[in-house]
Image (cartoon, rainbow, N blue to C red):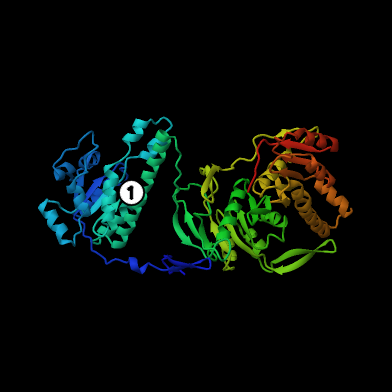
Amino acid sequence: MPDESGCFSPIHRVFGVYVYRNHADSNKQEDVTLNVKRALISVSDKTGIIELANGLKDLGIEIISTGGTARLLGDKEIPVIPVEKITGFPEMMDGRVKTLHPKIHGAFLGLRENPEHVKQAESMNIQWIDLVVVNLYPFEKTVAGSDVNLEEAVENIDIGGPAMLRSAAKNYRHVAVVTDPADYPVILDELKTGEISLETRQRLAVRVFRRTADYDSAIDRYLSETLMDEKILRLHYEGGETLRYGENSHQRALFYRDRNCGEPSVADADILNGKEMSYNNYIDADAALEAVKDLPSCGVAVIKHTNPCGYATGKSPAEALERAWAGDPISAFGSVIACNSRVDLAFAQFLKGKDVRHVGYIVRDGKMLPQDLPGKFVEVIIAPGYDDEALELLSRTKALRLLRIRELKDYTAELLTFRKITGGMLQMERDLAVMESFQVVTKRSFDEEKTALAEFTMKACKHTKSNAIVLGRAYGSGSFQLIGMGAGQPNRVDSLRKLAVIKAMENLQIEYDACQPGESLIDYTRKAMGEMVLASDAFFPFDDTVRAAAEYGIRYIVQPGGSKRDQDSIDACDELGMAMAFTGMRHFRH
């Protein structure tokens, strides 16, 4: 097991299980005091550089600088030593050669405790440089432009900058190196105490090597595609947080984060309460959040094994939750829930209010019988915020993980997704849309409410594993609910007959028993089924799904279309008095 550092070193493998040795202690280094006397500053991004340089000046630190940076600092009356005065060489070849000189790199790389290094430095009149502040030509920004040409891209490949960064970072025991303006205040604060700590120098050195690796990767990708017509994929994730185990208890697992993701996500959520997130928690929480991103406020998704067993909109978060939960109250036990609006007290009370019980159901003699269980057990809740009273109530359940994400508005969605296979990686565009069009292809049409219901039901279907058939219904003006779902079947007729319809009928029986309407269960069910919309994630290759749906009284279907036998399904709908619309967009999910 790891210690608090999370560091492992593999020893050997026994019966398929790796045994690990902690190596954190072996990497500890003796602290070396760093009193900064001289700094070199050469930056492309001038953000915060005046404030930093003024701070260094006030501390009596000598500043060496280059080109445009030196001119900027001079204009602000900050004393600088031009780099050519140190090297004895002027800038050459339009600034391509400025700092590639032994008097610069020797001042970075020399080991201060090594007598031979000290002797050589003295003989060559090399004076140590203790702080290096460098950032790089904006290559990534340059090649991101739509009209960039090869010559412009190549001119933005920095040579001296990465060389200085790497030299200084290699000698982090004696040199502090900064490449991110966000670190300037940290450096100044520590310098005011008299030195920069070894811990800070180590952290900054790692950030430098990470930055130069990303920079070289960007150059590799651009030139490989431009000059060699080859696409290169390099992915950068950070953290490596150790999880308790993977999908199963015999599998080790780590969690990495993409620090550059600008989209609200489970990965950057604040965990306000509960146990540590598990591998499966992350998978289901991500599925839940992606499902509610498609819904208008207020929307709720209840997820089990990445499938929406509950999905609903409502006039309030609590109403949406109650309806989503009712879509499959048995499966909702132990689920992951996402809400796309702020969680209020009523939402919390539905799950954890006084005397709340979880009413499950068992099938006996063909009837759904209630089974009373204590509480409503939920693994994770994800929302953009929690009212104080709601947070206090939910936090009484110490194990319940409460995740707070950023607001689901005004963000740029990630456009690509990746999937590892043995020996390879698949890349594709994310499935962010729902429908390309809404084309009614039958004699019977959809009214405005049924059209809105069809869109909601297709959203639910989009987030359900293929082959997917989903049944949705309206329960109020503009409010919708998933009432039956069939997922992951080899054929969609089974998804309909054996899963979606069965679940819908179970839910209708529960309603019937609760309200006791003045009609038979068969009439009540058939009337309700006739007002639902059936959504399919892919086209119907035959008319069998249409005819199976008609057997249960379903009258509205929405599907992508695109089969060679579309006309067979259209003719069957017209024969049976059903309405069907094509969306032009398939939603396979594997």
Q: Quadrant of residue 441?
A: top right
Q: Position of residue 504 (x, y in %)?
A: 77, 53
In terms of secondary structure, where does tag 1 sit? helix
x and y percentages locating residue 510 in the rendered image:
80, 58
Residue extending furthest left?
A: 123
Which residue is identified by label 1? 181
**Residue 24: percent from the left, percent from the top?**
37, 67
Q: Nearer the viewer, residue 213 or 296?
A: 213
Instruction: Give the crowd class for mark 1: few <14, some 14-19, many >=20 residues within 10 Å.
Output: some
Please tell me which residue lies in front, 184 or 119.
119
* Rendered position, 394 above or below 213: below
Q: Amino acid at mark 1?
A: Pro
Residue at 81% x, 38% y is 578
Residue plotted at (85% across, 38% down): 576
Would residue 220 appear left or right of 290 to someone viewing this image? left
For the image shown, how many numbered marks are present on the structure?
1
Residue 98 appears left or right of 541: left
Q: Quadrant of residue 365?
A: bottom right
Residue occupying the point 18% across, 61% down: 114
Relative to 180, residue 560 above or below: above
State whether residue 257 is above or below residue 441.
Answer: below
Residue at 73%, 45% in the rendered image: 477
Q: Is residue 58 left or right of residue 394?
A: left
Q: Is residue 321 visible?
A: yes
| Residue 221 image-quadrant placement | top left
x, y percent for residue 113: 18, 62
Observer able to see residue 61: no
Left or right of 282 on screen, residue 46: left
